[in-house]
Image (cartoon, rainbow, N blue to C red):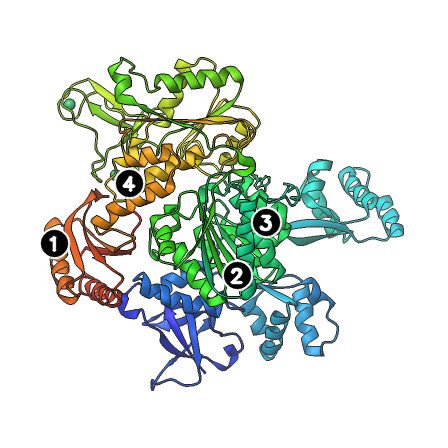
Amino acid sequence: MYAKVVVDVPNVETDKPYDYRIPEDLRLFVEMGSRVSVPFGGRLIQGFVIAISEMTELDKVRDIESVLDLTPPLTDELVHLGSRLSEEYICRQYQVLQAMLPAALRSNYGKELSLTPTGREQILLDNQEQKVMSYLERGSVDFNQLCKQFPEQLPFIRHALKQGWVEAVQKIKNRITRKMISYIRCCLTPEEAEEALRTLVKKAEKQRLVLNYLLSLDHPVALREILSTLKVTYSTVKALEQKKWVEIEEVEERRDPYAGRSFVNAKPIAFTTEQKEVIDEIVVSLQVNQFTSYLLHGVTGSGKTEVYLESIAKCLDQDREAIVLVPEISLTPQMVERFKGRFGNQVAVLHSRLSHGERYDEWRMIREGKVKVVVGARSAVFAPFSQLGLIIIDEEHEGSYKQEESPRYHARDVAIARAKNHHAVTLFGSATPSLESYYQCSKGKMKLLRMQYRVANRPLPPVHVVDMREELREGNRTMFSRPLAEAIRDRLQNKEQMVIFLNRRGFSTFVMCRSCGNSLQCPHCDISLTYHRSNQTVRCHYCGFTEQVAEQCPSCGSTHIRYFGTGTQKVEEELSRHFPGIRVIRMDVDTTTQKGSHEKLLSEFRSGGGDVLLGTQMIAKGLDFPNVTLVGVIAADTILGMPDFRAAERTFQLLTQVGGRAGRHQLPGEVVIQTYNPEHYSIEFAKTHDYTGFFAMEAKHRFEKDYPPFYRLILFTFSSPNVPLIVKLADEWNRKLQILLPSSIYMLGPVASPIPRIKDRYRFQCMLKYRNEKQVLPIVKKMADAFSSRHKKDDILLTVDVDPQILM
Ligand code: ADP
Ligand code: ZN
Ligand code: ZN
């Protein structure tokens, strides 16, 4: 038997499967989707088995050295998907397969086997088999060690794994994967115990205490409970163990990141007419078992999440599984609660704030079929389910669904590919769908579902746009326009809450010299440094360069240094200055670095611990606070000025989303947007909540300029410390591609990137625009491969981004 293996060598020439022989003793364990260790060059490296065959065309093949998984972590479907994605996104197959796994599985520290409760109950085993099981009964055993111990019993071990009598768990660096808790059990009969207590010397007071405690409870007690309740030390327990009066057992505790929280079981609600229509439509598609993709365009507060929940319930009824993707930042406990409340422990949750161990545990539940629903951020789209029925992407317009490092996949495309494999349904939802998806509907490739009204006919909040130029002209130099200031005062008086939104941390807080106009730049990245008031430093958000604030301009020596723009800290200070006594809860990257701090701030706000929730993107979506009646946007212009063809779309989306936070409950809401560009169409349409109007206008611009969704883009970025080399190679690249590709396809550039230098590497980019012509990707892939192998020795890097979301 032979295996085709894609190996972990970061080199384009090696990005094809290699044949290896599967040695006799591994035959039972090597399957499609297994990770294996194979000899390559002079060393052992990791690889994925992507096919198994009975023959090879090669004369000489080497043996697989060992297998890293006892059950393959990847399903056949995911393996196939991997090769497809590597072509579509022009990246190595190994990288894609790796990206599908939790980080804990990206390294290899061996496997541990242990008995499961069903394993303990097995009695119909022969002698040899019994020996294996008894060996495992003593505790978990390293897989290789077990194989050495029982070389004849490999088939049985395999069988036991398949039957679920034994489970294999990946070890993680520096600690075991599973969290073990020590339990203390008394192993004396009541008579023996009495005897023991009598023989204990007088001064062994503590040991007596422990023993009595155990006897009084009559069940094993966690070690930590004993230590804390009885105020004894570990040596006391150890002494009892040495006398063989107690035993210390290690018991696995599943690391449940939501442990200790109770989820109210959600009651079914009466759906609105719109919800009912949408659900009925989805249910029919689920029942006919045919791939269908839907775009649910529902205004904020129209009850989309309830539609998701009901569709999932219907999907589970069919014994199929569901994946729900939400943007990382909206994976708040509030959101998770709605899914856990409805589906209880059938739900696994995956997000980046989990530790490697926690993520691995959740993933294992999915792979082992112990959960049916996954709620997670982007990478959860790879959840290794085998009976998928439904993939939901909430806030489908969000840029974070695109991975910004290789493999640069978009979760929407992966979802569609997977749904096709499973004859499943995809449901993308948003109040502000991406132009790409909405356009798919007009072409009939996706079905459009609409929910135009908020639940209970609550009105969408009125939006006031304030022209900040006017404010300035009339002498208002503060960051709060008069209408916003008035609205804030009003809310304070009525004891209602507000959300004040500021775009992106630090993006607009730069330091400028008023004498020479020079702004402080990062010495490595050609980007303005941002000012952090708390420790009087300026910092670069690309490379981390940090410096004390200068008192003198580095260019002209003037002392008229000024801090321009507004960061969240600045707004917080100004709020306190203008509205004495106002309680502000600030949420930005600086206040939420610690695990759990995000949630803490939100629940503080929810319980009325603040008048204002002040923050960046983070607070724009997903949040639902009954008492919020005002949403203020300090400056709508910050995104508009970005060098990106999606600037208008992003502005419209953001304004609509933040506006959606107001008036979702009984109290009516209001939105105030401050801007220097009040006549810009993205702001005008946001003001009237007019998505279709916005779409028509934006589509017109995109069409005229050959941008998506009418054209597709591939962005090539070259980076090197050597400018002449980049210019030369990028230019060559452009000309060659132009020759190889049909003339309908055109290339732009090379030009310096919007951020021309990062970490002392200069950056140039070229852009390819095409209309999805089939031959483009293979040609580009070939060229990129050739480029990388030709310039292995030069310090130049080419990144290829298919369907880029960020053009910097
Ligand atoms: P969206 O995801 O579209 O913003 P949600 O699903 O979060 O909307 O619904 C907004 C609010 O309305 C939530 O508090 C939700 O519990 C409530 N809700 C949704 N559907 C109904 C319904 N049919 N009846 C009563 N309340 C509902
Ligand atoms: Zn100066
Ligand atoms: Zn920098």
Mark number for residue 255?
Answer: 3
Residue 319, percent from left and from top: 61, 63
Q: Residue at x 65, y 66 (%)?
A: 136
Residue type at tag 3: Arg
Work out whether residue 577 or residue 688 is closer to the camera in this orientation and state it.
Answer: 688
Work out whether residue 173 or residue 453 is closer to the camera in this orientation and state it.
Answer: 453
Q: Tell me the residue that label 2 is attached to.
A: 285
| SS type, badge 3 | loop
| SS type, badge 2 | helix
Q: Are marks 1 and 4 in contact (CB under 8 Å)?
A: no
Q: Residue at x 38, y 54 (%)?
A: 441
Q: In the displayed structure, does residue 254 sit left or right of residue 783?
A: right
Q: Quadrant of residue 293?
A: bottom left
Residue type at tag 1: Leu
Image quarter hosting the N terminus: bottom left
Observer-side mark, 2 or 3, equals: 2
Q: Is residue 553 above or below residue 65?
A: above
Measured in 3D between alpha carbons, the distance from the residue under mark 2 to the one under mark 3, in whole angstroms, is 37 Å
Residue 721, percent from left and from top: 17, 48
Q: Residue at x 25, y 21 (%)?
A: 469
Residue 76, percent from left and from top: 47, 70
Residue 284, percent from left and from top: 55, 60
Residue type at tag 2: Ser
Q: In the displayed structure, does residue 706 sit left or right of residue 220?
A: left
Please indicate, yes or no, whether residue 293 appears anywhere in the rendered image.
Answer: yes
Question: How many residues crowd mark 1 within 10 Å: few (<14), some (14–19), many (20+)?
Answer: some
Observer-side mark, 1 or 4, equals: 4
Mark number for residue 647?
Answer: 4
Observer-side mark, 4 or 2, equals: 2
